[in-house]
Amino acid sequence: MSTPLDTNVRYLTDSGLETTLVFHDGRDLPAFAAFVLLDDVRGRARLDAYYREHADVAKRHGMGFIFEAPTWRSNPDWGREVGYNAAALDRINCEAIDFLRRIELDYRATPTLVSGQIGPRGDGYKAGEMMMAGEAATYHVRQIAAFSKADMVTALTMTYVDEAVGIALAAENAQMPVVISFTTETDGRLPSGQPLGEAIEECDARTDGYVAYYMVNCAHPEHFAQALDGSFAARIRGLRANASCLSHAELDAAETLDIGDPPALGAHYRALTQALPELTVFGGCCGTDIRHIHHIVSELSPVAC
């Protein structure tokens, strides 16, 4: 599948939405589900401000921007946990794309894309109970269908390859470009134990290369930088790193937010552009916020922050 990106453009996306809402805003976010804010007037206003804050940085630095829908948790299992049945999830997933399209209108001079974000069926920190690829395709197909007005779908925090393959196959059936983002433990392996490069190569082999590109998210650069040696590295075009160097298990047990070292994170991103020659999409994950985005961009852009 060809990439939906303009290959002459570097793109910014957002940072750690859920950790920003919980730890900085003090919101009670059930099951870490940000999509519920779309059903609240003040919640929608907060999301609007959040996306604009990030898109403004991209605009100021001559970068493109990818609007990622706040739908990481809006799948059947997590939706049911916060009181959304299948029909309610269809509605909210469609509304999430419409919501971003309205914001996008104010950034017509900036290269932009709207992405329907898909999260794992289970815990984003653990592989847990794993589905076969066919089951994963059936599980995620309805959410992908609800993203029909998006430019692409992005599956973040994939912990094992079969779920990623299933999402890719479901997206192909819907004729929707798809991005797969794996997470890693501190040893550069997926939570399932599979090496990152092997997971990318297997996913490509089982989908005939349908995935537009791959990303890494929800891991600190120090966790996976040593795992990038191989031809598969050319398939990684995006990075949304964690602020903290802590492991997933340590983060899960933490009661306070570790924002790490924002300037050092920016330097890590710059270094990774050397190891990953196709790296063109930059954002953040757990613990990051607009401060980290500024430091990342300052390392990538000649325009001063």
Image (tube, helix red, strand yellow):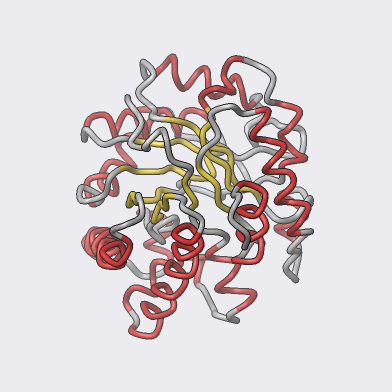
Q: Quadrant of residue 82?
A: bottom left
In this view of the protein, which residue sits in the foreground, 305 or 42? 305
x 65%, y 66%: residue: 291
Q: Quadrant of residue 287?
A: bottom right
Q: Position of residue 116 (x, y in %)?
A: 34, 50
Q: Quadrant of residue 99?
A: bottom left
Q: How many marks?
A: 0
In this view of the protein, which residue sits in the foreground, 123 or 230? 230
In the displayed structure image, the side of residue 227 where residue 282 appears, left or right: left
Q: Position of residue 173 (x, y in %)?
A: 22, 30
Could you tell me which quadrant the N terminus lies in?
Answer: top left
In this view of the protein, which residue sits in the foreground, 282 or 226? 282
Picture layout, residue 83 above or below residue 172:
below
x 48%, y 57%: residue: 58
x 57%, y 48%: residue: 124
Could you tell me which quadrant the C terminus lies in?
Answer: bottom right
Picture layout, residue 248 above or below residue 230:
below
Q: Position of residue 204 (x, y in %)?
A: 44, 19
Residue 18 seen in this snapshot: yes
In the displayed structure image, the side of residue 92 where residue 63 appears, left or right: right
Residue 136 seen in this snapshot: no
Picture layout, residue 45 above or below residue 128:
below
Q: Position of residue 276 (x, y in %)?
A: 62, 29
Q: Residue furthest bottom?
A: 42
x 42%, y 53%: residue: 65
